[in-house]
Image: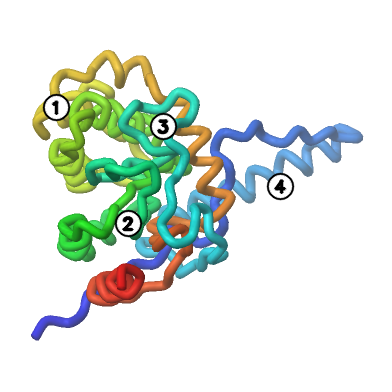
Amino acid sequence: MSAPQHMPPLYPPGPPVDPFAPPPIVAAKSSSAAAWVVGAIAAVALVAVLVVGAVAYPVVTRVSGEPTAVAGGGSAPTSAAGAPSVATGFGFRTAKPSPSDTDRRVVVTLFEDLQCPACKQFESMFGEAITTLRANPDVVVEYRMISFLDRASTNNYSSRATNASACVAEATATGGDWSTWLRFHTMLYDEQPTEGGAGHTDAALASLAVGAGSPDVSSCIINNLYASWIQAGTRDALDAITGTPTVQIDGVAVDLSTPSELVSAVERAVA
């Protein structure tokens, strides 16, 4: 019997900062003070670079456990400014819409960043369990794709890849079929670029999308069509989580170790 596959530690090791916030302005009182401030900032930046480069799987951080959606299922907001039409609030619910106004299915929300190495590991370990959950008619698997790791590449790969994901969703899932988007999602993790270098170009992302079965979404990718929605969704998510991947069941974060624990926890919520 093979060893159980455990939930990867969350990324990053400390609370993620808002990647879209302007940098703080430091007013130096004298030239010597200014030099000290610049030197201190440089030292901190160097430490951060060394830590990012040295840690393969960062230490575990915990989420607050506070709900960000209506407990007991409920309906998330049906729209958000600048969102793809297939989005529910800031998420992609990879199931057909409920026939009634109130969706009483259990909602399993996965918070991920496409540049996050722990998210790639999570998808590899928990992918089969998530597929099982998607097949359950009483469950909705929702993906909250956020982008707080632009700093981990030289060309803002995190937010560009998230935008490409939204482009493919809008181009292929309007009829409720998420299979193409899910293939693209898997491909982006299979082809995840190494941290610290350049991520895939816009042209490469568009090519991967076509390879997943999407029509050409080059224009949507190049124009970064969903940038404002992604920024708003990232900020909303960072109010509730401290790293990715994070799993919520009906809006409440859960600590999991194995895929079987995830399936069991959801089955208990359904019962």
Instruction: Tell us which disc is closer to us: 2 or 1.
Output: 2
Sequence-first disc among 1 and 4:
4
**SS at circle 1:** loop
Q: Quadrant of residue 28?
A: top right
Viewer-nearest residue: 39 or 241: 241
Asked if residue 178 shows in the view, the reply is yes
Residue at mark 3 to residue at mark 4: CA–CA distance: 25 Å
Q: Are marks 1 and 4 in contact (CB under 8 Å)?
A: no
Instruction: Tell us which disc is closer to us: 3 or 2.
Output: 2
Sequence-first disc among 4 and 2:
4
Q: Which mark is residue 105?
A: 2
Residue 92: x, y in percent?
32, 41
Q: Which mark is residue 156?
A: 3
Q: Amino acid at mark 4?
A: Ala
Residue 205: x, y in percent?
23, 28
Sequence-first disc among 3 and 1:
3
**SS at circle 4:** helix
Viewer-nearest residue: 271 or 141: 271
Q: Amino acid at mark 3?
A: Asn
Quarter of the image containing the C terminus?
A: bottom left
Few, some or many C-alpha atoms within 10 Å of disc 4 (few <14, some 14-19, many ≥20)?
few
Sequence-first disc among 3 and 4:
4
Instruction: Tell us which disc is closer to us: 1 or 4.
Output: 1
Instruction: Tell us which disc is closer to us: 3 or 1.
Output: 1
What's the residue at 72%, 36% (across, down)?
24
Residue at mark 3 to residue at mark 1: CA–CA distance: 23 Å
Q: Which residue is mark 1?
A: 214
Q: Which mark is residue 40?
A: 4
Q: Are marks 2 and 1 in contact (CB under 8 Å)?
A: no
Few, some or many C-alpha atoms within 10 Å of disc 1 (few <14, some 14-19, many ≥20)?
many
Residue at mark 4 to residue at mark 2: CA–CA distance: 51 Å
In the rendered structure, the answer to whether residue 163 lies left or right of residue 239 reads left
